[in-house]
Amino acid sequence: MVQLFPEAVKRSRFSIRPGNGILPQGFADYLNVPWKRSENAIQFFKKELERVSKHLEAFAGRKMSPDDLNHAIIHFNKHRSLLKKIYDLRKAESPPVSGLDAFYVTMSGFILPKERHMRLMEQCLAEIEAAPAVNGHRVRLLISGGCVIDADLWKLIESCGALIVADDVNNGARSIWPNVAEGGDPLDALARAYIQRPCGFNSLISTRFAFIKERIVTHRVQGVIFAINKHCESEAFDYPQLEKKIREELKVATLLVETDYLNQTEPLRTRIEAFVEMLG
């Protein structure tokens, strides 16, 4: 999967380009993420982080002090703050950045070292300020799903006359909210922050709806596309209730498309074009 994105991000209008410096993975471990948000679940997750950190210390041949972890937390929070600036730009009536551009910027952050990515994002933000607004779209959409990593799907949606101004996906907005608390017990802070990610496998419907509702309101979303991967049970189980609440409480239309990590997008075009036409 990683090898797909260096070439993909080169198609962005802005300067986020990983290049070819991807190294083979030298360390692997399995992290058990709890399915609940109770205090017991948080303490369990903290123990899991402690276990993995010990394995990582053995692999690296050095200890990680609380100061090391707190420094990393501050560093990653700064990285999130830059991504949030790009996301906030999409609230504008005529955003200076498309959903596809924001996708490329976010995805490249999973590949590049954070320091390099932050330098590129600062350059990217400067370019965005001087860039013309994205015009020609008829409707403002939010895309919701698990891991919607196929750039061709984002491109297809925006080629149909829509603009993706917000998202509710693991490789997008969910990955940068909330920040991790700084200055305390770093493993406890990490456990409490990461267990709050509004993903279908560990979140109540009310929590997920609140996350989506905020983005629908602040970004003036006119329609929601649920792009749910085949066999993703947690997202599929949440969909009927989420769709109903969005449609009935927020009066926002929705469309469900079944996707995969890589898609044959053209068969979806007619449905998406009809959805955009209905909204526009």
Image (cartoon, grey):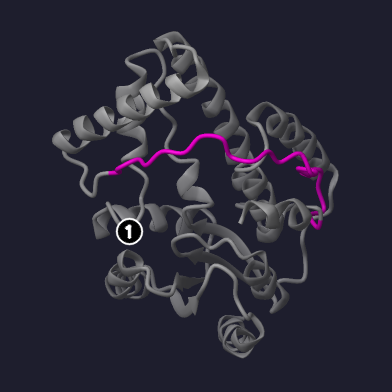
**Left or right, residue 56 beside residue 272:** left
Crowd around label 1: few <14 · some 14–19 · many ≥20 (10 Å): many
Rendered position, 76 above or below 141: above
| 266 relative position to 60: left or right | right
- Asked if one can make out residue 95 in the rendered structure from this viewpoint, the answer is no
Q: Quadrant of the N terminus?
A: bottom right
**Residue, x 39% and y 13% (percent of image)?**
183
- The image shows residue 68 at horizontal and vertical percentages of 48, 13
Q: Is residue 29 magenta?
A: yes
Q: Position of residue 81 (x, y in %)?
A: 57, 32
**Residue visible at 75% across and 38% down?**
125
Relative to 225, residue 25 above or below: above
- Magenta-tinted stretch: 11-33
Residue 8 makes an appearance in the image: yes
- Residue 249 highlighted magenta (yes or no): no
Q: Amino acid at mark 1?
A: Gly
* Residue drawn at point x = 21 percent, y = 42 percent: 37
Front residue of this view, candidates 211 and 220: 211
Image spot of residue 65 (x, y percent): 42, 10
Residue 7 placement (x, y as % from top left)? 78, 55
Q: Residue at x 57, y 26 (%)?
A: 78
Identify the residue position indicated by label 1 in the image.
Answer: 200
Closer to the camera in the image, 82 or 153:
153
Q: Is 203 above or below relative to 32?
A: below
Quarter where residue 94 is shown: bottom right
Q: How many marks?
A: 1
